[in-house]
Image (cartoon, rainbow, N blue to C red):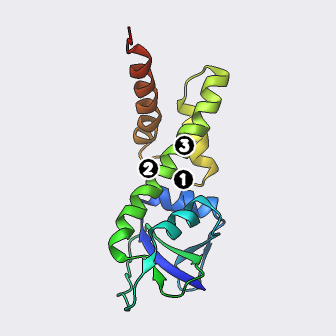
């Protein structure tokens, strides 16, 4: 059975998933993606689904970061609880951060150059507008924090 949930995300995360899952805009202006049950996001949705024998109030939002997700689930009574939607949005942000780090790290370690242009290219590839959807320094900070964390690990002495 095909079901639908509506998640409110930051605009840059919405655009990231919109490009990753080949999203489309419906006639009423709602951006929507279809998630396969074998994808990372599909497995996550399946894990947080649980049997809910009553009808939940559907969440509607006019926020520009609202994304509608269609997914398939075999058991009709399984639903994603409304109280889990903020946690799903938080994890989707983590997926975005991990993808950005992996993409930038590949170019940064290969070319040994400044990672700023690599961050810009990664954002541009996903259709995320720099300094409009996400502040450029915030995007750089995601990778900078990753580098700092790895340097702290290397500096530890286990003697």
The residue at the point 53 percent across, 31 percent down is 116
Of residues 127 and 7, the one nearer the viewer is 7
Q: Are marks 1 and 2 in contact (CB under 8 Å)?
A: yes
Instruction: Give me the residue at 54% from left, 43% from top.
Output: 100
Q: Are marks 2 and 3 in contact (CB under 8 Å)?
A: no
What kind of element bears circle 3?
helix
Q: Sequence-wise, which precedes: disc 2 or disc 3?
A: 3
Q: Position of residue 97 (x, y in %)?
A: 48, 45
Outermost residue to the top: 159
Reply above or below: 31 against 93: below
Q: Position of residue 144 (x, y in %)?
A: 44, 30
Q: CA distance from mark 1 to mark 2?
A: 8 Å
Residue lying at 45% horizontally and 41% vertically, measured from the top left:
139
Disc 3 crowd rating (10 Å Cα; few below 14, some 14-19, many 20+) is many
Residue position marked by numbered label 2 in the rendering? 134
Helix, strand or loop at label 2? It is loop
> How many other residues sit within 10 Å of disc 2, few (<14), some (14-19) or many (≥20)?
some
Report the residue that reaches farthest toward the bottom: 54
Observer-side mark, 3 or 1, equals 3
Tell me how far mark 3 sits from mark 1, CA to CA: 12 Å
Q: CA distance from mark 2 to mark 3?
A: 13 Å
- Is residue 132 at least partly visible in the picture? no
Read off the residue under disc 3. 100
On screen, residue 103 versus residue 77, left or right, reads: right
| Mark linked to residue 128 | 1
């Amino acid at each position: 059975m095909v079901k639908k949930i509506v998640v409110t995300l930051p605009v840059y995360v919405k655009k990231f998933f919109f490009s990753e899952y080949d999203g489309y805009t419906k006639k009423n202006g709602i951006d929507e993606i279809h998630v396969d049950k074998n994808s990372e996001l599909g497995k996550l949705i399946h894990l947080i689904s649980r049997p809910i024998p009553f009808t939940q109030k559907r969440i509607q939002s006019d926020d520009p970061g609202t994304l509608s997700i269609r997914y398939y689930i075999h058991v009709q009574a399984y639903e994603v609880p409304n109280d889990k939607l903020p946690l799903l949005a938080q994890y989707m942000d983590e997926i975005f951060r991990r993808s950005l780090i992996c993409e930038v790290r590949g170019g940064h370690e290969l070319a040994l150059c400044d990672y700023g242009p690599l961050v810009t290219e990664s954002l541009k590839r996903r259709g995320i507008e720099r300094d409009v959807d996400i502040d450029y320094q915030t995007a750089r900070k995601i990778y900078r924090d990753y580098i700092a964390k790895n340097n702290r690990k290397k500096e530890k002495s286990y003697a």
